Image: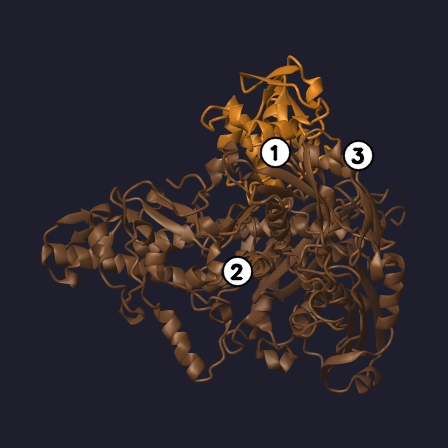
Chain colours: A orange, B brown
């Protein structure tokens, strides 16, 4: 039995401990905000926070998260008011929007660590998150705007 | 405020105008009557009128107004990042005089009989629907005005709709849309010639840049529902092991170990079709389970022997040689002007070059996924698709159901780029639900499945030869394009590019060269070739715009000046004079090739980019221009190559002339995305085959551009945003084709190295 919390609520799982957290969230807990993109930690679509750190849920064995706190997009803020979410809307960052959940979770973790990131900081932190629509220029701008707003 | 994405048009509010309240009056839309007349007269149809299902503009089908005034619009095209749901709302709200903040967008299910054409590809949505959408808004506005006039007993000319209410101008009386909706809904839909439209100076939303996306809140909070997010009570989860070679079939399989995986429920063999297989699923062995992880784990334990079939030796290295050999010899003539031999005889200098572009996979971030429930009474599908009607037709035929019994709920697409024009994944989900006796099944392509079983962009060799006279003017142009055709999906081994493919930049070159020959030697398809954003324009534009750069260099001319000169004087060329029988399905009279507009985007982008400016060591500027999807685009790229051969892109400028711009903010975002997708395919993306199998599996092998390699600056320029007198052009795709040649032209300017084979990858190492 693995016990952990998702967005502050207790969860426990006694199935296959090899199951990636992603599929637990999507198929078992029914929380579809976290997206499947590659299954190999190559694209970042599935990014969640594990004890506050950005983590690829598609390769995180559920057996390895006992006692830990998972935060998904559904729990990043109660009402979509996290500065990153606000900046994303103000700049119309999204095109299809599918990868943006992972981008937002990655960006929020970056701003926790580096409140005023440089272009190089942003590129280094965000390079694991693919967007096929090509929203990268707006992602850079939105992160800077969120950093300004977070001061 | 537009809110959550709802798959079907069900509202719990009292809805008094429109379909949802059951007040829909069955009437034959005028546009259909008009079409019937045209058919009788034998007039050829073009544009949206020529598409299956045609165009619909009955407001009762698309609009409802609740008694609290909330307007609900049904969007009949797929949202895949182009912003169609937002742009639709802007157009309708404007002509309706509605407050956009009080308009909600719902998504129409698949039904072309009711909603008109829904095939969201070819950069057609706004191009075809702008006028019908304006009619929808203007019709409903007129119905509301008439209802108010009747209520007050005044002449209709005395009332005017303004900002979600109707005002009686002499008395100042006013009624909100909610209060008027019921009476308005009982009125007849006005005839087209009774409608009045706003003039552009009266627009409040159309053409304005400050509109937020209707799906922003859902997307940023994770509540937006994409196809993969469908949750149906009691659903199971499945993946399929498909034949790794196109045309392959299962010889034998052993599922003993797979069945032992906890959560695996059933193994289902899906029959493989004969090839060419069209849109049919490839068959194979499916694992149905309680969750996706169990299905994937079960699949990894299947032992399958494949019969690989006739494409087992498909090998990209040898196939490239095959294409190059074909390109070295004459082929089917697809356009001829003047006399090529005398053109070369008059030449002082002769230049030739051969270009190569490999297969590409669309790789949308949401892989193909669908959920289906099939019972004897009907079939319901939830998925993200560009062409829902194709699914309805397939499932109707497959299960012997009347098409009305096949319901396709259209959710958001996590990217499409052409991949989701094909219904194969929805068919698989339905086959599996049927095999599970009606349990709903969610079928997911893993990323590996997506990359192995794409409908790939074609692979191409383009050979060009040019003659230049003593003054550096072109005297002869020979282009041989060799690439397997998409038609090979449907027919018995066609070996030539179809008119639609040739019309994507190969025959429709607008150059003022007296002697010109375009040939299309044979090529055989050995995998599924399909649509990828901008399709055959990619190889054609890469080769042609690179070759223009090579000709300019051969005579020591400035690229931009030479490009303008080779296009020649401003003129409007009829498609038939370009041997172009397609022009994107549009009326050739309405859409001539306007060289003035092509030169306009070149001049605009060059001026904005500071063409000719002084650059740092190792930097260079390149330019390219192209018409596709009846829009004109041009790109200037600044490339920087380090002494070690590392490429960076400090700046890209891109200009489009697509006629009037409805949603400038989304046009700019489409151009930004097109630049990055163009950079991706130019620099690192490649699908190659060995032993019939795609050699790449995931984003480690099939690389796509990430943020750190993305251009540092992208500047977008709209050339005729208020050109309401011009016919609308496409937007989603036309940004892509000129990017790769602008980049390789810039690399040549920076380094003297000419890239003729994509992707560039490490070709710049140690060359500087």
The residue carrying mark 2 is B719
Decide: is B636 above or below A98.
below
Label 3, residues with CA under 10 Å away: few <14, some 14-19, many ≥20 = few
Query: Residue at 61% of width from left, 60% of height from top?
Result: B734
Side of A15 where B60 appears, left or right:
left
Residue B405, position as x, y percentages in the image: 48, 55
Asked if the residue at tag 3 contacts the one at tag 1, i.e. Cβ–Cβ closer than 8 Å, the answer is no
Decide: is B262 above or below B664.
above
SS of the residue under disc 1: helix
Label 1, label 3: how many angstroms apart (C-alpha)?
38 Å
- Residue in the foreground of this view, choosing between B587 and B673: B587
Q: Chain of mark 3?
A: B
Of the residues tagged 1 and 3, which is closer to the observer?
A: 3
Label 1, label 2: how many angstroms apart (C-alpha)?
32 Å
Label 2, label 3: how many angstroms apart (C-alpha)?
62 Å
Residue B5, position as x, y percentages in the image: 45, 42
Query: Residue at 74% of width from left, 41% of height from top?
Result: B699
Q: Chain of mark 2?
A: B
The residue carrying mark 3 is B257
Q: Chain of mark 1?
A: A
Q: Quadrant of the N terminus of chain B?
A: top left
Of the residues tagged 2 and 3, which is closer to the observer?
A: 3
Residue A75, position as x, y percentages in the image: 52, 24
SS of the residue under disc 2: loop
Side of A50 where B178 appears, left or right:
left
Label 2, residues with CA under 10 Å away: few <14, some 14-19, many ≥20 = many
Could you say which disc has been placed on residue A103 in the image? 1
Residue B564, position as x, y percentages in the image: 66, 69
């Amino acid at each position: 039995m693995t016990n952990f919390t998702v967005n502050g609520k207790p969860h426990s799982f006694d199935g296959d401990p090899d199951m990636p957290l992603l599929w637990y969230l999507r198929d078992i807990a029914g929380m579809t905000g976290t997206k499947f993109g590659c299954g190999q930690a190559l694209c970042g679509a599935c990014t969640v926070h594990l004890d506050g750190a950005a983590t690829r849920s598609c390769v995180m064995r559920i057996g390895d998260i006992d006692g830990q706190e998972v935060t998904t997009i559904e729990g990043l803020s109660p009402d979509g008011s996290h500065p990153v979410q606000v900046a994303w809307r103000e700049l119309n960052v999204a095109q299809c929007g599918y990868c943006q959940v992972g981008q937002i979770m990655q960006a929020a973790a970056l701003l926790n660590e580096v409140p005023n990131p440089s272009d190089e900081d942003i590129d280094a932190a965000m390079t694991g998150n693919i967007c096929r629509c090509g929203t990268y220029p707006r992602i850079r701008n939105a992160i800077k705007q969120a950093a300004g707003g977070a001061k | 405020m537009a809110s959550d994405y709802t798959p079907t048009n069900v509202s719990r509010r009292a809805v008094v105008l429109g379909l949802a309240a059951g007040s829909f009056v069955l009437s034959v839309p005028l546009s259909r009557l008009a079409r019937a007349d045209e058919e009788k007269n034998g007039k050829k149809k073009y544009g949206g009128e020529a598409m299956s299902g045609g165009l619909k503009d009955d407001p009762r089908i698309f609009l409802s107004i609740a008694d609290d005034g909330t307007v609900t619009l049904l969007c009949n095209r797929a949202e895949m990042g182009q912003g169609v749901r937002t742009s639709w709302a802007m157009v309708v709200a404007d002509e309706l005089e509605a407050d956009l903040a009080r308009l909600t967008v719902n998504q129409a299910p698949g039904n072309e009989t009711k909603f008109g054409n829904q095939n969201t590809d070819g950069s057609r949505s706004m191009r075809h629907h702008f006028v019908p959408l304006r009619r929808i808004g203007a019709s409903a506005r007129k119905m509301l005005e008439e209802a108010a006039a009747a209520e007050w007993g005044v002449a209709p000319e005395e009332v005017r709709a303004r900002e979600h209410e109707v005002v009686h101008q002499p008395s100042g009386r006013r009624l909100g849309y909610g209060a008027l909706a019921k009476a308005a809904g009982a009125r007849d839909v006005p005839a087209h010639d009774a409608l009045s439209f706003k003039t552009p100076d009266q627009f409040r939303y159309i053409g304005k840049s400050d509109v937020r996306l209707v799906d922003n809140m859902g997307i940023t909070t994770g509540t937006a529902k994409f196809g993969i997010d469908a949750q149906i009570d009691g659903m199971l989860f499945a993946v399929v092991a498909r034949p790794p070679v196109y045309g392959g079939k299962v010889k034998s399989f052993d599922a003993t170990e797979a069945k032992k995986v906890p959560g695996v429920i059933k193994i289902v063999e899906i029959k493989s079709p004969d090839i060419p297989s069209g849109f049919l699923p490839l068959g194979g062995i499916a694992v149905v389970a309680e969750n996706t992880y169990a299905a994937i784990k079960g699949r990894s334990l299947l032992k399958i022997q494949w019969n690989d079939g006739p494409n087992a030796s498909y090998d990209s290295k040898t196939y490239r040689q095959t294409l190059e050999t074909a390109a070295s010899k004459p082929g089917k003539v697809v356009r001829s002007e003047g006399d090529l031999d005398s053109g070369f005889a008059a030449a002082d200098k002769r230049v030739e070059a051969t270009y190569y572009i490999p297969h590409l996979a669309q790789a949308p971030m949401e892989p193909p996924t669908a959920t289906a429930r099939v019972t004897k009474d009907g079939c319901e599908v939830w998925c993200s698709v560009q062409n829902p009607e194709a699914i309805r037709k397939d499932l109707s035929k497959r299960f012997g159901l009347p098409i009305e019994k096949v319901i396709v709920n259209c959710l958001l697409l996590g990217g499409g780029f052409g991949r989701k024009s094909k219904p194969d994944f929805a068919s698989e989900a339905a086959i599996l639900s049927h095999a599970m006796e009606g349990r709903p099944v969610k079928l997911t392509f893993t990323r590996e499945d997506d990359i192995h079983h794409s409908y790939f962009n074609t692979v191409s060799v383009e050979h060009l030869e040019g003659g230049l006279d003593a003054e550096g003017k072109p005297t002869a142009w020979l282009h041989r394009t060799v690439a397997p055709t998409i038609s090979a999906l449907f027919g018995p081994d066609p070996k030539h590019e179809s008119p639609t493919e040739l019309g994507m930049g190969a025959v429709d070159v607008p150059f003022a060269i007296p002697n010109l020959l375009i040939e299309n030697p044979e090529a055989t398809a050995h995998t599924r070739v399909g649509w990828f954003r901008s399709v055959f324009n990619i190889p054609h534009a890469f080769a042609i715009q690179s070759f223009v750069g090579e000709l300019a260099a051969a005579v020591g001319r400035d690229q931009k000046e030479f490009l303008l000169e080779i296009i020649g004087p401003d003129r409007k060329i009829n498609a038939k004079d370009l041997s172009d029988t397609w022009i994107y399905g549009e009326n050739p009279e309405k859409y001539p090739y306007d060289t003035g507009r092509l030169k306009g985007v070149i001049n605009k982008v060059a001026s904005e980019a500071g063409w000719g400016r002084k650059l740092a060591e190792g930097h260079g500027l390149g330019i390219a221009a192209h018409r596709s999807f009846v829009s004109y685009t041009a790109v200037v790229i600044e490339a920087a190559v380090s002494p070690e051969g590392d490429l960076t892109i400090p700046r890209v400028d891109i200009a489009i002339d697509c006629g009037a711009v409805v949603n400038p903010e989304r046009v700019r975002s489409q151009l930004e995305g097109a630049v990055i997708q163009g950079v991706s395919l130019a620099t690192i993306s490649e699908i190659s085959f060995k032993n019939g199998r795609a050699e790449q599996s995931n984003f480690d092998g099939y690389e796509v551009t990430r943020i750190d390699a993305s251009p540092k600056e992208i500047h977008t320029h709209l050339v005729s945003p208020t050109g309401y007198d011009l016919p609308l052009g496409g937007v989603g795709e036309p940004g892509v084709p000129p990017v790769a040649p602008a980049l390789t032209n810039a690399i040549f300017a920076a380094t003297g190295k000419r890239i003729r084979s994509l992707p560039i990858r490490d070709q710049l190492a140690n060359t500087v």
